[in-house]
Image (cartoon, rainbow, N blue to C red):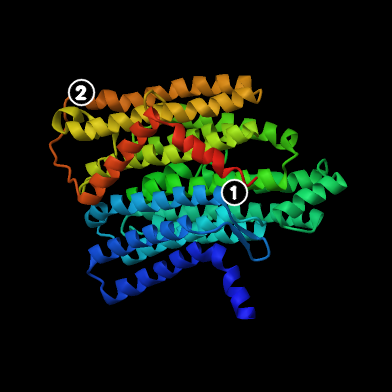
Amino acid sequence: MNMSLTLSSLFPVLPEIFLACMATILIVVDFLCPRNREMLAQLALFSVFGVLFVLYYQEPGLAFNTMFIADSYSFFFKVICLFGMLMTILLSGQYLKVEQIRQGEYYSLMAFSVVGMMLMVSAADLIVVYLGLELMALSIYCLVGLLKSDVRANEASIKYFLMGSFSSAILLYGITLLYGLTGTTDFAGIARYCIETDILKNPALLTGFVLILCGFFFKVGAAPFHFWAPDIYQGSPTSITAFMSVAPKAAGFAVIGRFLLMAFPESHQQWGPLLVIISLLSMAVGNIIAISQQNVKRMLAYSSIAHAGYALLGILAGTSEGYSATMSYLLIYGFMNMGAFGVVILMCSRGNRRESLEDYKGLAKSHPMAALLMLIFMFSLTGIPPTAGFVGKFYLLKAALAAGYTGTVIAAVIFSAISAYFYLRVIRYMYMDDPQEDFTPHYSPGLTAALVISAIGVLGIGIVPGSIFEWAARSLVCF
């Protein structure tokens, strides 16, 4: 009977257990069949679809004495994380051949990192948050440095490890202060204690709260905790850069949302001004510095910082409309960013990665389909209708405006207009200049599928956005 109770209590964690087992199997298969690359990719795809199947039929529940919550909110973000893994697998086939990267540890580390993300988005306790965050981060540190012969990849991996370690230490110190004052690391317990004792104005509590948020802001790449992003995005394998720009960011925002909603639901006056500063600073740093970038991956890194600022607008609003707008925007961002990095991978060949903006000159004349795809994704990142990027920004700005943040919304619109310069510059190079060199992009089946999915997502959500936003709104019912 006790064994039955123990097994039933693990049902909420079944998707994480399944994916962890599949990650281990990937290592074994790579050891037994080291040259069968297609089998590893197929097994990784099976892992994603298997977890999605388990998630779909999973009932909401609690595990580990309410430290872990499987609910509609976590389901939404787990789908985004798994979507990031699925798209990365599709993007990776041709790229791994070009860069000659071993595939066993590649897919296995990616799966373990997603396990960490899934733990994070279901965490209702700061200890579980930290465990999931470290599992995610340690796996990505290794993925960033997989190109062992590349100096840039080695530098990026070391930088990311060192700065990630510092951010983890800051997060742990904040958790220590919060635990010392409230006697618990449980989100609901912290909220109860704050209400019962009126400790919200305690400087030590506010310090711990800010330190924890700083640790989270580092993971989502928000300014001024963004310094790692440009070098790591540029030095990492491009497929891993695409993965990092979508899945970990979604997991980080999921934790921020649950932490604020569950642990400090009545403290908007305390954390609202802080989010205003972080959001505006992220938009300013990301959009302004991106103007001077000549490397496409660095440009997309600063773009990622700016989009973190946009996504914070929904959380800043502190309303269900705001949270659902942020959730929807993160999914939309996944489609348009995966598509943009997919075109970067399409341009890549052995010995020439073609990451400079100069490499995109005349692309519309030599390879019109690649140029058209990049145009769609750049329009969406800018926020031009009828793409999904426009719809996502519209709902974020609407939620922030309804919450009374008129000045912040005006600033966001101005920064969005500034971003048009560096996004549309890529389009100008492609359509208004002559080709610099002749090359043949290789449309592998996986890469083609990823680009088609991204384009359909960007245009489909832009034209018919209702279902995504309704799904996000329904996911907040648990709160």
Q: Name, please, the residue furthest toward the right.
A: 197
Front tag of 1 and 2: 1
Query: From the viewer's perspective, is residue 201 above or below residue 90?
Result: above
Mark number, residue 433: 2
Of callouts 1 and 2, the N-terminal one: 1
Point out the image quarter for the N terminus: bottom right
Point out the image quarter for the C terminus: top right
- At label 1, which amino acid type do we have? Val
Kindly identify the residue that appears in the image at 61 percent across and 43 percent down. 477
**Can see residue 222?**
no
Q: Where does the image place residue 256, in percent across and percent down from the top left?
A: 61, 45
Q: Where does the image place residue 282, in percent across and percent down from the top left?
A: 54, 33
Mark 1 → mark 2, Cα distance in angstroms: 45 Å
Query: From the viewer's perspective, is residue 75 above or below residue 44?
Result: above
Residue 165 falls in image quadrant: bottom right
Label 1 crowd (10 A; few <14 / some 14-19 / many >=20)? many
Element on which disc 2 rests? loop
Residue 341 falls in image quadrant: top left
Q: Where does the image place residue 7, in percent across and percent down from the top left?
A: 57, 73
Residue indicated by mark 1: 255
- At label 2, which amino acid type do we have? Asp
Element on which disc 1 rests? helix
Mark number, residue 51: none
Compare residues 323 and 288 and report the one nearer the observer. 323
Contact (CB < 8 A) between labels 1 and 2? no
Kindly identify the residue that appears in the image at 72 percent across and 42 percent down. 265
**Horizontal side of residue 362 vs 468, given as left or right:** left
Query: From the viewer's perspective, is residue 419 above or below residue 336?
Result: above
How many discs mark residues in the rendered view?
2
Q: Where does the image place residue 217, in percent across and percent down from the top left?
A: 58, 43
**Can see residue 401?**
yes
Label 2 crowd (10 A; few <14 / some 14-19 / many >=20)? some
